[in-house]
Image: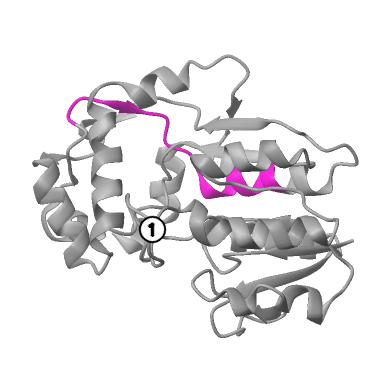
Amino acid sequence: MTILITGGTGKTGSRLARRLLDVNYLVFLTSRKGVVPEPFKGVKFDWCDPSTFENPFTVDPDMDRIYIVAPDGGCAGEVIEPMKPFIDLVVTKGRIAGGPSIGMVHEYLLSLQVDYAILRPSWFYGNCSPCLGTSNLLTMHLHDIKESNTIVTVSADGMLGFVSADDIADLAFEALTNAKSHNTDHILTGPELLSYDDIAHARISVEELKDRYIAFGLPEDFATLLSSMDELNASGVEESIFGTPGKVTGRRMLRDFIEANKDSF
């Protein structure tokens, strides 16, 4: 079995790769330049450059399972637009195992009638660490936490089931390595409901949050998407998801995450 991880150097991809390597699976990670950390094997892949889509199957024709992480907004248009041609290519190769995706990508995978598993995690704890393109405690909020002990959002009193990237990687590992395909979507939350006020919080408008994301270097359309998603938290969307029957509950608490990363703050 050979497994490809798109976004293999990101938060969930890197954790998943380590788990797979530890039990001797052959793993390839994608990056825009094809350069990845040792001891992993890398392949050049860029969602915005369809000419790179064939590369994984050139370096290893036996590639048979794929963990797909949706592009982070760097390409123009809807998320489905760069993903659809690659998914089509994977299907022609006769091998697809699915992965986390959003919106129309879910529907597209279902329409193809292929084996899949879709991961739908709540907001990450790890969105507080340095990694452009995500948005919580160790990324977008890190500067405010360090400088003024605040977290600036439009989530108001909304409660969220913050989840650890490690719990996401654990579930992805099961989905990729289980003999029987899951063929379902997994809603994944952490073990507790928390508001940003439970941590440290300063409220701003949706437009102000969008401007902050743009200042961090995100494209305007992606900044608009993230800020509108943040606004949904204020209306209780994430709290209702937390109560979804059959959801997967991670075991790692926010307090444990903060303790493990306290030097970053």
Is residue 161 part of the magenta span, yes or no? yes
Place of residue 26 in the rendered image (x, y in percent of width and height, measured from the top left):
84, 68
Give the left or right position of residue 115, taking residue 99 as reference: right
Place of residue 131 in the rendered image (x, y in percent of width and height, measured from the top left):
39, 65
Q: Which residues are magenta?
A: 156-172
What quarter of the picture does the N terminus occupy? Answer: bottom right
Local secondary structure at mark 1: loop
Is residue 218 part of the magenta span, yes or no? no
Closest to the observer, 207 or 52:
52
Give the left or right position of residue 98, taking residue 100 as reference: right
Q: For the residue carrying disc 1, how many other residues have a C-alpha within 10 Å: few (<14), some (14-19), or many (20+)?
A: few
Give the left or right position of residue 141, taking residue 72 as reference: left
Residue under the image location 85 percent in, 42 percent down: 178
Closest to the observer, 263 or 105:
105
Question: Number of marks in the image?
Answer: 1
Place of residue 88 in the rendered image (x, y in percent of width and height, measured from the top left):
70, 57
Residue under the image location 72 percent in, 80 percent down: 39
Residue under the image location 87 percent in, 73 percent down: 61
Place of residue 177 in the rendered image (x, y in percent of width and height, measured from the top left):
83, 48
Closest to the observer, 76 or 164:
76
Give the left or right position of residue 258, taking residue 202 as reference: right
Q: Using the rendered image of the protein, determine whether residue 18 is visible from the camera's viewpoint.
A: no
- Quadrant of residue 247 within the rendered picture: top right
- Quadrant of residue 24 within the rendered picture: bottom right
Q: Using the rendered image of the protein, determine whether residue 58 is visible from the camera's viewpoint.
A: yes
Name the residue carrying label 1.
77
What quarter of the picture does the C terminus occupy? Answer: bottom left
